[in-house]
């Protein structure tokens, strides 16, 4: 097992760190990171750079010596805002021309109706007001067009992957999740390199581990601890970049299968496709739960009569941890209510976890003594890492990523049903601390993101800043620098 990273000397004075994205004027990241710099005695400054797309100016700034690192949020992937505005302008012109054409047709019909059908009004000719009309539904071609537009809008939604083509390399975490929210400047062969990684994944993982540590304060729980294969499963509610980060976080903790709760089957399928490599190589199974019946099929089992009542064996071990990654709004539509029903169904099931002794011959060998296991499959933390068994939670853990409001509807339900609640503010703090460690060390590795490189007082002050913050309301309009030519 490689030794943990040693504390690095502070970066040179006057370094600047940026958050790229749009809109970001409401972000609390400057408060958080500048509090860290101040506490560590570092002459660094974290600033906002509002842009909806990757620009040449932005990439040049990242390469400057005075730039220490960067964070990325909501950068458009593949399509510039100017292109979108141009398309909208063309559509607006076409709409005006269409209206003028309709008015011209109405005028012609009005003239013809007055000449040849003096007793018939033009409205009656057009809309058959003299007799009941059948209900009108969109034609199949119109429906397909609407679906196509919806799909294209999804494709051009803000993503954290567009930045990667401008970097020298990305970490395994960034590559597997398809997302990059942090840029670390490293040195290799005397050359500065821009390395992209995903600290959102670390924010989720470290928040879950912190909750587990609070339940087992006497047990040392480190980076290399995992659940034995087949001991427990996990679940994620959502379908975007945060969902991918959550799936990977649960997987690195040893949970398998991982259940996805999502009202959109196409989004769920996209999540599964994203992790096809892990499925083929590591056996990761991702299951889209579409009904409460499927929850019972995979996790519930039924009471059956025998010599006494016994629970039928479920197809998967119990869910130990859940990550919620959907907006914190009350469900309105049928599909939204179904998501809440499925999640509540999972929350009400009693967790059924095989004992560790039953997993001795697991396909993922774990050594409780901490000796290396060269025979086991590839470890996401590296081939030479020790694998230690994680303890099961005494109260299963529910991490809710949205934090406005702090007590979301799903978090209220989970808490009422006895789960250990973890607010999204914790994940936000943990990913920010991971960024601080990486920037300070000039290293984007997983070990550095989890290492004790910061002063405990720095971490305490940073947590305090975020936990006590109020909503940030920008006083001036936010200017998108990505719109500049």
Image (cartoon, grey):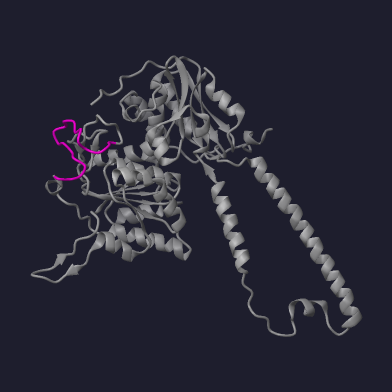
Snapshot quadrant of residue 100: bottom right
Instruction: Tell me the quarter of the image containing the N terminus.
Output: top left
Judging depth in this view, the residue of 413 and 221 nearest the camera is: 221
Judging depth in this view, the residue of 140 and 158 nearest the camera is: 140
**Residue 2, percent from left and from top:** 25, 24
In the rendered structure, the answer to whether residue 312 lies left or right of residue 65 reads left
Judging depth in this view, the residue of 294 and 18 nearest the camera is: 294
Per the image, is 369 magenta? yes
Q: Is residue 277 at least partly visible in the picture? A: yes
In the rendered structure, the answer to whether residue 115 lies left or right of residue 78 reads right
**Residue 219, percent from left and from top:** 18, 36
Q: Residue at x 59, y 37 (%)?
A: 53
**Residue 452, percent from left and from top:** 30, 26
Instruction: Tell me the quarter of the image containing the C terminus.
Output: top right
**Residue 400, percent from left and from top:** 38, 48
Q: Is residue 299 above or below residue 366?
A: below
Q: Residue at x 27, y 36 (%)?
A: 379
Name of the residue lying farthest toward the right: 115
Please provide the residue range marked out in magenta.
361-379
Q: Residue at x 23, y 37 (%)?
A: 225
């Amino acid at each position: 097992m490689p030794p943990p990273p040693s504390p690095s000397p502070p970066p040179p004075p006057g370094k600047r760190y940026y958050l790229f994205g749009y809109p970001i004027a409401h972000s609390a990241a400057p408060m958080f990171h500048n509090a860290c710099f101040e506490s560590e005695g570092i002459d660094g400054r974290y600033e906002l750079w509002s842009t909806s797309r990757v620009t040449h100016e932005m990439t040049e700034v990242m390469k400057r010596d005075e730039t220490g690192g960067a964070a990325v949020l909501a950068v458009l992937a593949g399509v510039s805002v100017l292109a979108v505005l141009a398309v909208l302008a063309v559509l607006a012109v076409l709409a005006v021309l269409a209206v003028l054409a309709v008015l011209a047709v109405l005028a012609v019909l009005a003239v013809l109706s007055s000449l040849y059908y003096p007793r018939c009004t033009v409205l009656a000719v057009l809309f058959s007001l003299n007799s009941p009309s059948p209900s009108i539904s969109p034609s199949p071609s119109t429906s397909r067009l609407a679906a196509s537009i919806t799909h294209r809008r999804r494709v051009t939604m803000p993503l954290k992957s567009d930045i990667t083509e401008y970097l020298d390399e990305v970490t395994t975490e960034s590559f597997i999740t398809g997302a990059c929210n942090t840029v670390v400047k490293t040195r290799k062969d005397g050359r500065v390199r821009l390395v992209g990684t995903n600290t959102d994944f670390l924010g989720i993982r470290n928040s879950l581990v912190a909750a587990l540590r609070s339940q087992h304060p006497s047990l040392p729980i480190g980076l290399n601890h995992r659940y034995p294969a087949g001991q427990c499963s996990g679940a994620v509610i959502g379908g975007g970049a945060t969902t991918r980060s959550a799936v990977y976080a649960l997987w690195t903790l040893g949970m398998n299968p991982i259940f996805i709760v999502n009202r959109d089957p196409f989004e769920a399928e996209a999540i599964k496709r994203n992790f096809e490599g892990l499925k083929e190589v590591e056996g990761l199974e991702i299951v889209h739960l579409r009904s409460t019946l499927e929850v019972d099929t995979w996790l519930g089992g039924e009471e059956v009569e025998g010599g006494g009542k016994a629970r039928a064996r479920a197809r998967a071990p119990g869910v130990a941890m859940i990550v919620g990654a959907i907006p914190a709004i009350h469900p309105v539509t049928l599909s939204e209510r179904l998501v809440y029903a499925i999640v509540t169904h999972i929350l009400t099931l009693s967790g059924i976890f095989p004992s560790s002794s039953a997993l001795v011959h697991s396909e993922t060998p774990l050594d409780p003594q901490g000796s290396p296991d060269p025979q086991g499959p590839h470890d996401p933390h590296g081939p030479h890492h020790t694998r230690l068994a994680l303890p099961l939670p005494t109260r299963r853990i529910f991490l809710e990523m949205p934090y406005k409001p702090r007590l979301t509807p799903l978090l209220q339900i989970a808490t009422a049903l006895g789960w250990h609640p973890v607010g999204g503010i914790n994940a936000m703090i943990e990913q920010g601390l991971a960024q601080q460690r990486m920037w300070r060390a000039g290293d984007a590795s997983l070990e550095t993101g989890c290492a004790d490189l910061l002063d405990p007082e720095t971490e305490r002050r940073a947590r305090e800043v975020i936990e006590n913050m109020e909503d940030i309301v920008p006083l001036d309009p936010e200017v998108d620098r990505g719109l500049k030519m």
